[in-house]
Amino acid sequence: MTVLVFDVGGTRLKAGLAAPSGIASLTALPTEVASADALVAQMTGVGRQLLGGERPSAIGVSIKGIVESERGLLVDVNAPLDPLSGEPLGERLAEAFEAPVYVENDARMHALGEFHHGAGRDAENLVCLTLGTGIGVGVVIDGQLIRGTRGVLGILAGHITVDVDGPPCTCGNVGCLEALIGTAGLVADAQARALDHPGSRLSTKAVDPEVVVIGGGLSASAPYFLNDVQRFADQHAWTQPKGRVRIAASRLGDTAALVGAAELANRALEL
């Protein structure tokens, strides 16, 4: 049984084959964002190259944006993937590969991957934050991935205003968490602070989780901030969660969403 998996990001497209030991034949390249047709063609080409003529038993797709998972429809997504809004990506890939396709939001796939195979394997309730170009959130409660009837439950924490006088966000709001601590926001802040320090190198459902997983590109820097974050959470968390929530860096790293997509596809096949 061969499961082909994709992780479609705004800047990178990652693909691979699900294997018991993780993701085999991992491939990464710049995402073709000119149009839906261009992206589908890119995914089809990469997938066929990885499969080497073999027909997949299923395909799992992790992608940023709001997803109607049952139909594999990308309901809405911000730039640079906005040409995909309203696109039945699952249907198009199913036709190209003649195999069932399962599509879900990327932050949820990070959460699913870490829950079953990574930093959350010993937990029943988990919150996964992906810190990178954007801020993604996935939530698992009692072992179940949370979606909601409209596909948005638990994933929009990056687009909550935390500073009413803050910078504009790509979603059209102002002062969103993503605008402040997403990659672009952090780089802009670092560059602004560097001007004051010429010698700096920078001048160049209720959830009660046992673990909060930090993933995304910034998780590679976890050794520099994770202890401080844990200490702050222990000191400032209100009442019962105080000192009981473990904050951990992603164990799956760059393949977390791919592992989650493989888990999604495999579980769907079992059902």
Image (cartoon, helix red, strand yellow):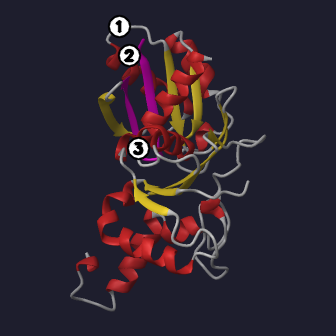
Quick one: label 2 or label 3, which is nearer the N terminus? Answer: 2
Where does label 2 land, which residue? Answer: 48
Foreground: 200 or 214? 214
- Return the disc, 3 or 1, that comes first in the chain's sequence: 1
Q: Circle 2: is it few (<14), some (14-19), or many (20+) Cα within 10 Å?
A: some
- Marked residue nearer the N-terminal end (2 or 1): 2
Q: Is residue 25 magenta?
A: no
* 128 sits to left or right of 200: right
Task: Classify 267 as above or below 228.
Answer: above
The amino acid sitting under disc 1 is: Gly
Kindly check if marks 2 and 1 are in contact, taking CB atoms under 8 A apart as contact: yes
Give the image location of residue 256, x and y in percent. Answer: 42, 42
- The disc labelled 3 sits on which kind of residue? Gly
Find numbered disc 3 in the image and state the secondary structure of the residue it sits on: loop
Q: In terms of depth relative to the viewer, which is nearer, 127 or 56?
A: 127
Q: Where is residue 238 in the image (x, y as percent from the top left)?
A: 63, 76
Residue matched to label 3:
118
Q: Give the range drawn in magenta.
A: 1-19
Give the residue number, with chain letter if any, for mark 1.
53
The residue depicted at 41 percent of the width and 49 percent of the height is 119
User: Which secondary structure, mark 1?
Assistant: loop
Q: Which residue is drawn at 31% across and 31% down?
A: 26
User: Foreground residue, 76 or 261?
Assistant: 261
The prevailing secondary structure element of the residues shown in magenta is strand
Locate residue 75 relative to residue 253 in the image: left or right. right
- x and y percentages locating residue 226 in the rendered image: 38, 68
| CB atoms of marks 2 and 3 within 8 Å | no
Q: Is residue 38 visible?
A: no
- Give above or below for 137 relative to 230: above
| Spatial separation of the CA atoms under disc 2 and disc 1 | 7 Å
